[in-house]
Amino acid sequence: MKNTDRINPAIAAIPQTKRDAINAAIQRKKNLPNLAAGNPVMPMPKTITDRTMAFLSAGFVRYTDYYGFPELRRRLSEVLQSQWGIAANPESELLITSGIQEGLYVVMRTILQPGDEVLIPSPHYGTYFQNTVACGAVPIVVPLDEAEGFQPDIDRLARAITPRTRAIVFCNPSNPLGVVWPRAAIERIADLARRHDLIVLVDEIYRDFVFEAPPPSIAGLEDMRIRTFTFGGFSKTYMMMGLRIGFVAGPPALMPTVKKLHYCLTLCPSVIAQVAAQAALDCPVDEVRPVITEFLDKLQLLYRGISSLPGVRCVPPGGSFYIFPNFRAYSSDSMALALRLIEDADVITLPGSEFGELGEGFLRLSVCAPKADVEEGLKRLQVFFQRCARNE
Ligand SMILES: Cc1ncc(COP(=O)(O)O)c(C=O)c1O
């Protein structure tokens, strides 16, 4: 038997991220404005740094409660109740994970069997598709139409449902689309899930990055807690991406099994990250709010600049770090366009195809870089596309 014959075909089938090709292309260039990253360059708030450093300096870094500090779960449960409208028992319905990324994996692995189908409104965050494939399940991408502001079309979703459909997974606000689905859309998805007995996986990592009030959490709607997993994070709100800490709130009947898999995978979340997460919940609003405001200002600036480019369409963002403009007037191959932008315009962007085939012809642009870099990146895109438009 060849060594490669031993690889599980479901794992081999996980699509390769396109970020590798972009990263390879930028090796040859220095200090380009980065409009591709989802990894902000800001430090975490001082309250969190101080508490985490004080903890570390004592030198004790033992294993913790497998499912996260009980006190962290208790505090989170209060926050979920008061701010998200979700009643989650800290003992039986909350799990602290090594980022949402782990949470998505342990939940999808727990609820999906080979051949099950998962509805993924698309363009989508790549991990939803990758985890579905890793489980031997079948991703059913359901188009979100740019002309409809990337809002979900419930009839289109309903038509994609078969007897094998088990779940729907989406994020709100959206990475990569930058749009927010309002209460009416969330209510219609809840209704669909109830009618067709679907599990809902909702990723709310960008919940704090919104121009208006955050949309309601679907788990807070009537009868939805028993069929909803809500994923939340610390990575973005508190600039704690590299600490790897997040949480999942899920149905009490399913969480004990999710926890067994989590135990196999990580034993417990990093103790350092849990201390930081607990400090994050104590962090004064004025240490967090200005950074969020700065992100939203940069997002407006980028949106205005990009939507005024000749031939480029862009759905206005409602939140997140991203916009998802349509560059089909210039190229229907978004990877080729992103590579050309690195070579000829000295700016890094991410091809829309990273977010599924339905993202082809788009680029995802982000505002994780400092404001000066976002401005410079935008200027370079303006010069490049104006030149292209003149030469056509
Ligand atoms: C939509 C979405 N979900 C999850 C993650 C990963 O979250 P975490 O750092 O909590 O694993 C990201 C990171 O970019 C993301 O954009």
Image (tube, rainbow, N blue to C red):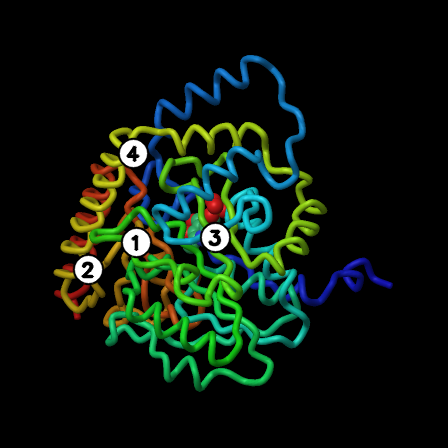
Q: Which residue is mark 3?
A: 231
Q: Residues within 10 Å of mark 3 (few under 14, many from 20)?
A: many
Q: Is 50 situated above or below 170?
A: above
Question: Which amino acid type is shown beneath numbered disc 1?
Answer: Tyr
Question: Which amino acid type is shown beneath numbered disc 4?
Answer: Val
Identify the mark at residue 322; answer none if there is no mark. 1
Question: Which amino acid type is shown beneath numbered disc 2?
Answer: Phe
Q: Report the residue at 42% width, 53% height from top.
A: 86
Mark toward the start of the polypeptide (4 vs 1): 4
Labels 3 and 1 touching (C-beta < 8 A): no
Identify the mark at residue 291; answer none if there is no mark. none
Q: Is 150 situated above or below 255?
A: below
Q: Is residue 153 left or right of residue 355?
A: left
Instruction: Tell me the CA gap for discs 4 and 2.
Output: 36 Å
Mark toward the start of the polypeptide (3 vs 1): 3
Question: Which amino acid type is shown beneath numbered disc 3?
Answer: Phe
Q: Is 360 situated above or below 110?
A: below
Q: Report the residue at 42% width, 19% height from top.
A: 50
Q: Quadrant of residue 327?
A: bottom left
Mark toward the start of the polypeptide (3 vs 4): 3
Q: Residues within 10 Å of mark 1 (few under 14, many from 20)?
A: many
Instruction: Tell me the CA gap for discs 4 and 1.
Output: 19 Å
Labels 2 and 3 touching (C-beta < 8 A): no
Identify the mark at residue 385; answer none if there is no mark. 2
